[in-house]
Amino acid sequence: MEKWTVFGLSALACLISFHSEASSKRYVASPTESKWEMAVNTPLECRLVHPIPHYGDAEFTSHASKKINLDFELKMRLPMGATRDVSLISMPPSWRPGDTADRISNLKFFKQFDGYVGGQTAWGILSELEKGRYPTFSYLGWESRNQRVEVALSSVLFQHQYDVFSQCISKLLPYSFEDIAFTILHYDRTSVQLNKASQKRLAQIAEYIRYNKDIDLVLVSTYTDSTDTKAVSQDLSEKRADVLRNYFQSLGLSEDRIQVHAYGKRRPIADNASPIGKDQNRRVVISLGRTQV
């Protein structure tokens, strides 16, 4: 993001002042209006929402993933009509007038998009709220060039819901849909059950499916090595496919959302002349599809 000239803190304090100014339009929840709500609290997603009267909503979101993540969006009722440089300032509440303003970051909000902040800066906004301060976004209004828009997040009643939000993040699954959408698992020689390592991976897929109601297709394709005859291999492949079909049905998926294909010894991906190659060919490929939102 582009940098802009940094004003002195005293100038910023005046710029983002909570006192009435004809040249600025301020949006902030009063202490009696301020509320924070957990809109989503699942092992797949945590979402903390703060309504800003007459402006929109501030939303913090974290998703199941291999890495801890945090996104912040300033959802506007009226989308930005022009791209704007934005100063993000941590302001003291009005009942702490002796405190100074601190600059958090410089951002850009893009035309026709909600204001987005990610990564360390998003965590920084949470940290300032936890201190009882008011993170404030300030930018030149696109409707009137002479008017500055100031949007503040109130820290009133923040702490309790922040504790709930933090607990939710600690319980997020350590993998995302993308991590399990395409998975190759393996079998021992003649078993219809997956080997131990693959069973653990299958359990992760199952856990994700239990919480995600948007999974609308599970595609299962089973294969064997070339040790047995075509008929024996095909029979084994079909049995493996049936086991997995029943498994996914036990998770609550309807039969029409599960497609299984048994290919037997066809379509090897490795040389069946070696033990390692045979291990690789004794496999099932599981692909997940979900409703796009």
Image (cartoon, rainbow, N blue to C red):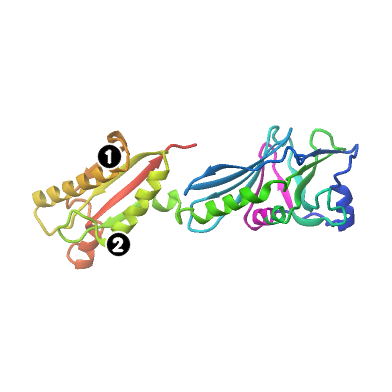
Circles 1, 2 touching at the beta carbon (< 8 Å): no
Is residue 198 shown left or right of residue 211? left
Is residue 74 shown left or right of residue 148? left
Q: Nearer the viewer, residue 52 or 289?
A: 52
Magenta stretch holds residue 108: yes
Q: Where is 88 relative to 256, above or below?
A: below
Check disc 1 and report the residue beneath it: 259
Is residue 134 shown left or right of residue 239? right
Q: Which residue is drawn at 18% across and 53% down?
A: 192
User: Label 2 sits on what residue type?
Assistant: Ala
Could you say whether the residue bearing mark 1 is in a helix, strand or loop? strand
Q: Where is residue 151 in the image (x, y as percent from the top left)?
A: 76, 42
Report, in whole angstroms, how far the alpha carbon at label 1 lies from the one at label 2: 24 Å
Res. 197 mark: 2
Q: Position of residue 160 (x, y in %)?
A: 63, 49
**Number of marks in picture:** 2
Q: Nearer the viewer, residue 101 or 221?
A: 101
Q: Nearer the viewer, residue 55 or 113?
A: 55
Q: Residues within 10 Å of mark 2 (few under 14, many from 20)?
A: few
Nearer to us: label 1 or label 2: 2
Res. 221 mark: none
The stretch in magenta equals: 106-126
Q: Which of marks 1 and 2 is nearer the N terminus?
A: 2
Q: Which residue is drawn at 85% across and 37% down?
A: 145
Could you say whether the residue bearing mark 2 is in a helix, strand or loop? helix
Q: Which residue is drawn at 88% across and 43% down?
A: 19
Magenta stretch holds residue 93: no
Q: Position of residue 256 (x, y in %)?
A: 29, 34
Is residue 19 shown left or right of residue 186? right
Residue 47 occupies quadrant: top right
